Protein backbone atom coordinates (compact mmCIF):
# COMPACT_ATOMS: atom_id res chain seq x y z
CA UNK A 1 0.00 0.00 0.00
CA UNK A 2 1.34 3.46 -0.89
CA UNK A 3 2.71 5.42 2.03
CA UNK A 4 0.23 8.31 1.78
CA UNK A 5 -1.88 9.56 4.68
CA UNK A 6 -5.43 8.40 5.30
CA UNK A 7 -7.68 11.15 6.66
CA UNK A 8 -9.81 10.09 9.65
CA UNK A 9 -12.55 12.37 11.04
CA UNK A 10 -13.57 11.54 14.62
CA UNK A 11 -16.31 12.97 16.83
CA UNK A 12 -14.87 12.37 20.32
CA UNK A 13 -11.51 12.03 22.08
CA UNK A 14 -12.17 8.54 23.47
CA UNK A 15 -12.44 7.34 19.87
CA UNK A 16 -8.99 8.78 19.13
CA UNK A 17 -7.43 6.72 21.90
CA UNK A 18 -9.21 3.60 20.67
CA UNK A 19 -8.25 4.21 17.01
CA UNK A 20 -4.61 4.84 17.93
CA UNK A 21 -4.48 1.62 19.97
CA UNK A 22 -6.36 -0.68 17.60
CA UNK A 23 -6.30 0.68 14.05
CA UNK A 24 -3.30 2.98 13.65
CA UNK A 25 -0.90 0.09 14.24
CA UNK A 26 -2.40 -1.72 11.22
CA UNK A 27 -3.19 1.22 8.91
CA UNK A 28 -0.01 3.29 8.78
CA UNK A 29 0.24 7.04 8.30
CA UNK A 30 -3.20 8.21 9.41
CA UNK A 31 -4.16 11.89 9.77
CA UNK A 32 -6.67 12.06 12.61
CA UNK A 33 -8.78 15.18 13.13
CA UNK A 34 -11.96 16.25 14.96
CA UNK A 35 -12.73 19.17 12.66
CA UNK A 36 -14.34 18.87 9.21
CA UNK A 37 -12.57 22.02 7.96
CA UNK A 38 -9.20 20.54 8.95
CA UNK A 39 -10.19 17.27 7.28
CA UNK A 40 -11.02 19.13 4.06
CA UNK A 41 -7.62 20.88 4.23
CA UNK A 42 -5.91 17.47 4.54
CA UNK A 43 -7.92 16.06 1.63
CA UNK A 44 -6.96 19.01 -0.56
CA UNK A 45 -3.30 18.36 0.15
CA UNK A 46 -2.89 15.11 -1.75
CA UNK A 47 -3.87 12.47 0.76
CA UNK A 48 -5.53 9.23 -0.33
CA UNK A 49 -8.80 10.28 -2.05
CA UNK A 50 -10.69 8.71 0.83
CA UNK A 51 -11.95 9.89 4.21
CA UNK A 52 -12.90 7.65 7.12
CA UNK A 53 -15.71 9.32 9.10
CA UNK A 54 -16.80 8.20 12.55
CA UNK A 55 -20.57 7.76 12.61
CA UNK A 56 -22.64 9.79 15.06
CA UNK A 57 -26.01 10.43 13.41
CA UNK A 58 -27.40 10.24 9.87
CA UNK A 59 -28.00 14.00 9.98
CA UNK A 60 -24.36 14.71 10.86
CA UNK A 61 -23.07 12.24 8.27
CA UNK A 62 -25.24 13.90 5.61
CA UNK A 63 -23.84 17.31 6.62
CA UNK A 64 -20.24 16.08 6.30
CA UNK A 65 -20.99 14.35 3.00
CA UNK A 66 -22.56 17.51 1.56
CA UNK A 67 -19.61 19.67 2.65
CA UNK A 68 -17.23 17.36 0.81
CA UNK A 69 -19.41 16.76 -2.28
CA UNK A 70 -20.12 20.48 -2.73
CA UNK A 71 -16.40 21.27 -2.81
CA UNK A 72 -15.34 21.08 -6.49
CA UNK A 73 -11.80 20.08 -5.55
CA UNK A 74 -13.05 17.08 -3.54
CA UNK A 75 -15.64 15.61 -5.89
CA UNK A 76 -13.47 12.50 -6.33
CA UNK A 77 -13.27 11.75 -2.59
CA UNK A 78 -14.65 8.41 -1.41
CA UNK A 79 -16.35 8.50 1.99
CA UNK A 80 -16.39 5.50 4.36
CA UNK A 81 -18.18 5.64 7.69
CA UNK A 82 -17.39 3.53 10.76
CA UNK A 83 -18.47 2.93 14.31
CA UNK A 84 -16.73 1.38 17.29
CA UNK A 85 -20.10 0.10 18.50
CA UNK A 86 -22.72 -2.00 16.73
CA UNK A 87 -25.03 0.01 14.47
CA UNK A 88 -28.43 -1.17 13.28
CA UNK A 89 -28.48 -2.42 9.67
CA UNK A 90 -31.21 0.06 8.70
CA UNK A 91 -28.97 2.94 9.80
CA UNK A 92 -26.06 1.50 7.82
CA UNK A 93 -28.34 1.30 4.77
CA UNK A 94 -29.39 4.93 5.28
CA UNK A 95 -25.70 5.89 5.35
CA UNK A 96 -25.04 4.04 2.08
CA UNK A 97 -28.00 5.85 0.51
CA UNK A 98 -26.11 9.11 1.15
CA UNK A 99 -23.41 7.91 -1.25
CA UNK A 100 -21.12 6.53 1.47
CA UNK A 101 -19.21 3.70 -0.24
CA UNK A 102 -18.98 1.41 2.80
CA UNK A 103 -19.71 1.14 6.52
CA UNK A 104 -17.40 -0.62 9.00
CA UNK A 105 -18.08 -1.84 12.52
CA UNK A 106 -14.77 -1.74 14.40
CA UNK A 107 -16.06 -3.76 17.33
CA UNK A 108 -13.71 -6.12 19.15
CA UNK A 109 -15.28 -9.16 17.46
CA UNK A 110 -15.15 -7.74 13.92
CA UNK A 111 -12.03 -5.58 14.11
CA UNK A 112 -9.56 -7.81 12.26
CA UNK A 113 -11.95 -8.61 9.42
CA UNK A 114 -13.07 -4.99 9.01
CA UNK A 115 -9.48 -3.70 8.90
CA UNK A 116 -8.68 -6.21 6.15
CA UNK A 117 -11.67 -4.86 4.21
CA UNK A 118 -10.49 -1.30 4.77
CA UNK A 119 -6.98 -2.11 3.50
CA UNK A 120 -8.47 -3.67 0.37
CA UNK A 121 -10.63 -0.59 -0.18
CA UNK A 122 -7.62 1.70 0.16
CA UNK A 123 -5.60 -0.40 -2.28
CA UNK A 124 -8.50 -0.44 -4.75
CA UNK A 125 -8.90 3.34 -4.59
CA UNK A 126 -5.16 3.88 -5.11
CA UNK A 127 -5.21 1.51 -8.08
CA UNK A 128 -8.20 3.34 -9.55
CA UNK A 129 -6.24 6.58 -9.31
CA UNK A 130 -3.64 5.13 -11.65
CA UNK A 131 -6.04 3.27 -13.90
CA UNK A 132 -7.24 4.39 -17.31
CA UNK A 133 -10.05 6.83 -16.78
CA UNK A 134 -13.54 6.06 -17.99
CA UNK A 135 -15.51 8.52 -20.06
CA UNK A 136 -17.28 11.36 -18.26
CA UNK A 137 -20.82 11.63 -19.65
CA UNK A 138 -22.84 14.79 -20.16
CA UNK A 139 -26.45 14.14 -21.14
CA UNK A 140 -29.35 16.58 -21.00
CA UNK A 141 -27.86 18.57 -18.11
CA UNK A 142 -26.70 15.46 -16.22
CA UNK A 143 -22.94 15.00 -15.72
CA UNK A 144 -21.80 11.61 -14.45
CA UNK A 145 -18.14 10.87 -13.75
CA UNK A 146 -17.31 7.17 -13.06
CA UNK A 147 -13.72 8.04 -12.15
CA UNK A 148 -14.69 10.42 -9.34
CA UNK A 149 -18.03 8.72 -8.58
CA UNK A 150 -20.16 11.84 -8.76
CA UNK A 151 -23.33 12.96 -10.51
CA UNK A 152 -24.38 16.55 -11.07
CA UNK A 153 -27.70 17.80 -12.39
CA UNK A 154 -27.45 21.31 -13.81
CA UNK A 155 -24.39 21.91 -11.62
CA UNK A 156 -25.82 20.51 -8.38
CA UNK A 157 -24.39 17.28 -6.89
CA UNK A 158 -26.69 14.39 -6.01
CA UNK A 159 -25.84 11.32 -3.94
CA UNK A 160 -26.43 7.90 -5.50
CA UNK A 161 -25.80 4.41 -4.20
CA UNK A 162 -23.38 2.16 -6.11
CA UNK A 163 -26.24 0.32 -7.80
CA UNK A 164 -28.10 3.52 -8.74
CA UNK A 165 -24.86 4.95 -10.13
CA UNK A 166 -24.25 1.78 -12.19
CA UNK A 167 -27.77 1.86 -13.66
CA UNK A 168 -27.63 5.56 -14.56
CA UNK A 169 -24.13 5.34 -16.08
CA UNK A 170 -25.04 2.33 -18.23
CA UNK A 171 -28.20 4.06 -19.47
CA UNK A 172 -26.48 7.36 -20.31
CA UNK A 173 -23.51 5.61 -21.93
CA UNK A 174 -25.73 4.20 -24.67
CA UNK A 175 -28.84 6.35 -25.25
CA UNK A 176 -31.49 4.40 -27.11
CA UNK A 177 -30.06 1.07 -25.92
CA UNK A 178 -32.06 -1.00 -23.45
CA UNK A 179 -30.44 -2.06 -20.17
CA UNK A 180 -32.10 -5.37 -19.37
CA UNK A 181 -33.48 -6.28 -15.97
CA UNK A 182 -31.27 -9.37 -16.15
CA UNK A 183 -28.10 -7.22 -16.44
CA UNK A 184 -29.20 -5.10 -13.47
CA UNK A 185 -29.97 -8.23 -11.47
CA UNK A 186 -26.54 -9.71 -12.25
CA UNK A 187 -24.84 -6.53 -11.05
CA UNK A 188 -26.90 -6.29 -7.87
CA UNK A 189 -26.05 -9.88 -6.98
CA UNK A 190 -22.37 -9.18 -7.65
CA UNK A 191 -22.23 -6.32 -5.13
CA UNK A 192 -24.55 -7.96 -2.59
CA UNK A 193 -22.76 -8.10 0.80
CA UNK A 194 -24.34 -11.38 1.83
CA UNK A 195 -25.27 -14.74 0.33
CA UNK A 196 -28.91 -13.81 -0.18
CA UNK A 197 -29.88 -13.70 -3.86
CA UNK A 198 -31.28 -10.32 -4.87
CA UNK A 199 -34.78 -10.66 -6.34
CA UNK A 200 -36.43 -8.74 -9.18
CA UNK A 201 -38.49 -6.59 -6.82
CA UNK A 202 -35.23 -4.94 -5.74
CA UNK A 203 -34.80 -3.67 -9.33
CA UNK A 204 -38.12 -1.83 -9.11
CA UNK A 205 -36.98 -0.32 -5.80
CA UNK A 206 -33.65 0.83 -7.34
CA UNK A 207 -35.33 2.42 -10.37
CA UNK A 208 -37.95 4.11 -8.19
CA UNK A 209 -35.26 5.62 -5.92
CA UNK A 210 -33.08 6.66 -8.87
CA UNK A 211 -35.96 8.44 -10.59
CA UNK A 212 -36.84 10.17 -7.33
CA UNK A 213 -33.27 11.47 -6.91
CA UNK A 214 -33.19 12.71 -10.52
CA UNK A 215 -36.20 14.95 -9.69
CA UNK A 216 -37.15 16.99 -12.78
CA UNK A 217 -34.95 14.72 -14.94
CA UNK A 218 -36.62 11.49 -13.83
CA UNK A 219 -38.69 11.20 -17.00
CA UNK A 220 -35.55 10.45 -19.07
CA UNK A 221 -35.61 6.85 -17.77
CA UNK A 222 -38.14 4.98 -19.88
CA UNK A 223 -39.53 1.55 -19.04
CA UNK A 224 -39.30 -1.04 -21.81
CA UNK A 225 -42.07 -3.32 -20.63
CA UNK A 226 -40.93 -6.89 -20.00
CA UNK A 227 -37.31 -6.10 -20.96
CA UNK A 228 -35.70 -3.31 -18.95
CA UNK A 229 -35.02 0.42 -19.14
CA UNK A 230 -33.56 2.95 -21.57
CA UNK A 231 -32.87 6.62 -22.17
CA UNK A 232 -34.09 8.03 -25.49
CA UNK A 233 -31.45 9.48 -27.84
Image (tube, helix red, strand yellow):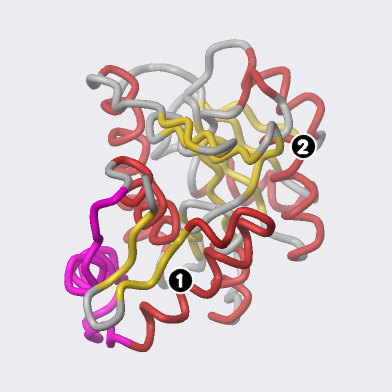
Residue 179, image x, y percentages: 25, 61
Residue at 29%, 86% (x, y): give it. Answer: 200
Quadrant occupied by the N terminus: top left
Instruction: Between residue 82 and residue 168, name the one nearer to us.
Output: 168
Assign a secondary structure to mark 2.
Answer: helix
Instruction: Between residue 31 and residue 80, name the one nearer to us.
Output: 80
Magenta region, residue range: 176-200
Q: Is residue 194 magenta?
A: yes
Q: Is residue 154 magenta?
A: no
Residue 152, image x, y percentages: 61, 38
Q: Residues within 10 Å of mark 2 (few under 14, many from 20)?
A: some
Residue at 24%, 53% (x, y): give it. Answer: 177
Residue 16, image x, y percentages: 69, 44
Is 197 located above or below residue 171 in the figure? below
Kindly identify which residue carries mark 1: 207
Distance of label 2 from label 1 (alpha carbons): 27 Å
Kindly identify which residue carries mark 2: 67
The tag earlier along the polypeptide, 2 or 1, is 2
Q: Residues within 10 Å of mark 1 (few under 14, many from 20)?
A: some
Is 34 located above or below residue 71 in the figure? below
Assign a secondary structure to mark 1.
Answer: helix
Instruction: Between residue 224 and residue 124, name the one nearer to us.
Output: 224
Amino acid sequence: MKNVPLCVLLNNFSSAEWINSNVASKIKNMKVTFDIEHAIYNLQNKTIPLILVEFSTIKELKHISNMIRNNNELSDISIISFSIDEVDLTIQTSALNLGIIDFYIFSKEKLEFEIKKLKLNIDRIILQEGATQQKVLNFNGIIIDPNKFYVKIEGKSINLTKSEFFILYQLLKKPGWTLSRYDILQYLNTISSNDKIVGERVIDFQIFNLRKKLKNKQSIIKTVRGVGYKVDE
